[in-house]
Amino acid sequence: MIDRHPWLDALAHAVLIAGILIVAFPVYVAVIASTHGPNDFMSGLVPLLPGSDAIANYSSMLTDGLSSSGAPPLGGMLWNSLVMALSIAFGKIAISILSAYAIVYFRFPFRAVAFWMIFVTLMLPVEVRIVPTFKVVADLGLLDSYAGLTIPLIASATATFLFRQFFLTVPEELMEAARIDGAGPLKFFRDILLPLSRTNIAALFVILFIYGWNQYLWPMMITTTSSHYTIVMGIKRMSDVADALPQWNVVMTTVVLAMLPPVIVVVGMQRLFVKGLIETEK
Amino acid sequence: MQTKRTVFGNRLLPYAFLLPQLAVTVIFFLWPATQAVIQSFQREDAFGLSTTWVGLANYADLLHEPTYLNSLKVTAIFAPAVTLLSVGLGLVFAVSLDRLVRGSRVYAALLVWPYAVAPAVAGIMWWFLFNPTIGLLPYLLAAVGYRWDHSLQPTDAMILVVIAASWKQVSYNFLFFMAGLQAIPKSMIEAAAIDGAGPVKRFFTIVFPLLSPTTFFLAVINLVYAMFDTFPVIHATTGGNPAQSTNILVYKVFVDGFIGLNLGSSAAQSVVLMAIVVTLTVIQFKWVERKVTY
């Protein structure tokens, strides 16, 4: 600290505490709501102190779901979300580390073309080309399948760029030494480059897991039966009950379960998360 | 394009390595995008039996369609509002944290986790807080004499979606400003302090100008976020209503294409959106390159 300004320090603390409270407030209200019975939301004000129905809400939603709005048990939806998030994260890492390896460590015709083809995907979020992409997936017969949920989302320019940047910083001598020792491209990749990329892979995994878990529009389009619903898109179905008020206690139970896994990943792997976030965006 | 000094001589291997990524890219990105461009020049009859080429008519129609012009206007309010709110708050939190030596790790940890929350989930939570009959915030607003109802009042609905969309983005901007602040040399701040500049003056004459690359980068990223990634927020809360007041461009593409089945118009809107993303991405990359050179 350069000069002392006790009142400025106090102000900084006050701003941060206020910020944390504002940021946490909606989640607090959601958690509280998930511990109440359905009758506490009919009139008046939302409850602000914990109720006694937490176990009943969570266990009934996890195992039975909400039949009145055709929602399957949340256990299955959580499983689908997990499969989707893990497949997208591992799939993206696998295909992009391979393509970055090809682009950095080989020279071949159409290398620049391949690079630019990957680059443009950066600019085409699924939302802006949703109708034709849906048609492709439908024509391939991938509706209502894990393949349809994940494969269209695993091409990623950002992951390829991250690995490309990292490979360019790997000392040239490593590869020259490996070649002198007789290592071919496959052996060099497996025994040297992959272990070196460990931290980058882990950081990227955190970001991609969150990306996959939080998908909303895509699973909504691709799933037509409840067996492949993911939890984030499932919330909407529950809050949309026809001609009735949403059952806030079970909607908020779902909300809490839907945000818990990615929040745990971010909090538990905070350093990797920050590294992944800052490096993938550059 | 950069490569290594020595490279492997294998002929087929690089293609094999590139194949999975290129296959996915072509099938699920380039092909649909091309289809969108082609469809934007076509029109289907009411029964979907025949398509005719109509040239630029779909685009021309957009310019005369009141709901599209309205959607442009809504996006022009929504995206900058989200950007301003989330970048502004991120900066305030980062600057506050930068002052503190003690407790900064705890504060940082408590501020970053909302990034992990899905936009749809954030939307539902704020929708609940703002619920006109039982929500807490309308209750508090009623105490000061304001009758909140986002299902009827366009302004209320806009405020709701702006807050819900900004909420999770604050943590992202906070992290980038933190990184930017740490990169500012302490000696510069010390020199200014010795010259007698107080903390406020130092912020406006040294810290903020040196943060400008970060600020610009975040402005572009947040505009892209607000224009394209906030679809779930709108879909889970207002559905574009009341009276189209929160119908942002990316939501309208979805509604016209999937619910209205107006493929030609939806495709033309997609192409316009792609043009906007490409422009923003190019601006961002140009800026990143400039940043590297100095």
Image (cartoon, grey):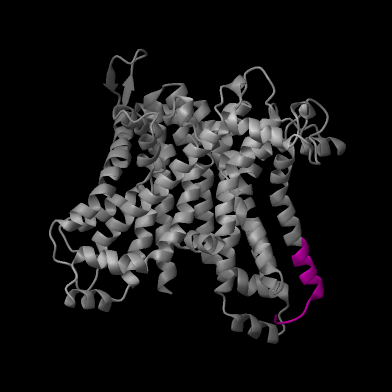
**Residue B274 in the image: above or below residue A237:** below
- Which percent across, then down, holds residue B259? 47, 22
- Which percent across, then down, holds residue B181? 59, 70
Q: How many numbered marks, from 0 up?
A: 0
- Image quarter where the N terminus of chain A lies is bottom right
Q: Which residues are magenta?
A: A1-14
Q: Is residue A201 left or right of residue A14?
A: left
Q: Is residue B17 left or right of residue A158?
A: left
Confirm whether residue B195 shows in the render.
no
Confirm whether residue B6 shows in the render.
yes
- Which percent across, then down, holds residue B161? 63, 39
| In the image, residue B130 lies in the stretch drawn in magenta | no
Name the residue located 71 percent from the left edge and 42 percent from the top edge: A31
Magenta stretch: dominant SS?
helix
| In the image, residue A2 lies in the stretch drawn in magenta | yes
- Which percent across, then down, holds residue A135? 34, 29
- Image quarter where the C terminus of chain A lies is bottom left
**Residue A16 in the image: above or below residue A147:** below
Name the residue located 66 percent from the left edge and 70 percent from the top edge: B98
Residue closer to the observer: A198 or B195:
A198
Name the residue located 39 percent from the left edge and 36 percent from the top edge: A146
